[in-house]
Amino acid sequence: MKKTDFNINISNPNSHLSLDKDDIKTLDNILKELLKKENEPNQQLELLTNTSMKYLRRLNEDGLVNFQFDANYQLKNPEITKKGYEFLKFGGYSKLSSKWKINLKKILYDPWTIAIFGGLIVGYILLFSNSSIENTSNHSNKLVKPLVRVEPYRITTNMDSFTTIDSLEIEFTYQGTKSIINENFRIVNYEFYDKPYILKEAQGFEMKPEINLLETFISNPIIDSVNTKESVILQIKRKMLLSGNRIAYFEKEDKEILGVINIAFDYVLNDSVVKDSIMTKIYFEKE
């Protein structure tokens, strides 16, 4: 194949699918074997057929190999892309990983970096000391908000229907001041990243994913020293079509971040209404 200049743009191999050193080594071995069988497509197919879906998915998402599946979700006609050939000649994931580590080391040991981080550390110590003195002297005059936590919004690979009802839990914890939770929960906005698992168009019709809040359940809205915690359950209506081909090689241990959702709410604190919001990630998981 004629050598050409090509922009190598691959994501950091230590992120995204939580690849460790053994995973990176395995990926590089797969790439080397593919390069050896460059003119033998049948042997390339056999190699990829016997490869874990976790690694197939990584190669596919980095654009190194194009995959097709038949009606039984069996791999067929894999095609190494131009980007794939260039990446093999570039040296694979190990070279990319070592290059990333070298750049990181260079940044961390740069004199300006050391000076900046040193200044930040000193500033933080001074700020912490001053804050501790202020909190000690004025503790009795301050109102402490409840601690608010939200679980990730989990979307599973279940494809029973287009419309699904989900539940999302938000937990309020007492931290020193009595508060009363209102039912004014609302979804401010949400964003789905451009992921191949979600179909945005089916048979020529555009069908964007939708999320709507149906109902809010609060068993005891008062959070005080007696009722230290309260879980608010949000019932969410979701409309979404999923791609069967992609789900076919989505392994159970995989967890993909599809987007984020921002939820607004308010509560009463010392006779005043406090408006607040919380954001959580939208996870795609196997049931």
Image (cartoon, rainbow, N blue to C red):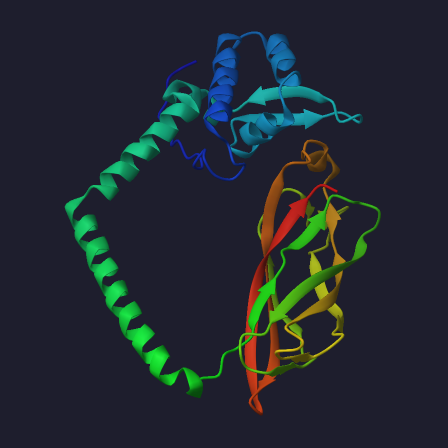
Q: Is residue 195 visible?
A: no
Q: Is residue 218 above or below residue 66?
A: below
Q: Is residue 155 above or below residue 142?
A: above
Q: Quadrant of the C terminus?
A: top right
Residue appearing at x 68%, y 52% in the figure: 154
Q: Residue furthest bottom?
A: 271
Q: Is residue 189 above or below residue 27?
A: below
Locate residue 49, reporting x and y percent.
Answer: 66, 17
Locate residue 52, reporting x and y percent.
Answer: 63, 23
Residue appearing at x 51%, y 40% in the figure: 16
Number of numbered discs? 0
Locate residue 215, reporting x and y percent.
Answer: 77, 72
Q: Is residue 14 visible?
A: yes
Q: Quadrant of the N terminus?
A: top left
Query: 80 or 51: which is nearer to us?
Result: 51
Choose top left, top right, bottom left or bottom right for residue 211.
Answer: bottom right
Residue appearing at x 65%, y 66% in the figure: 170
Residue appearing at x 19%, y 49% in the figure: 114
Q: Residue furthest right?
A: 160
Q: Is residue 190 above or below residue 28?
A: below
Query: 187 or 230: which is nearer to us?
Result: 230
Query: 239 or 100: which is nearer to us?
Result: 100
Choose top left, top right, bottom left or bottom right for residue 78.
Answer: top right
| Left or right for 118, reference 266 | left
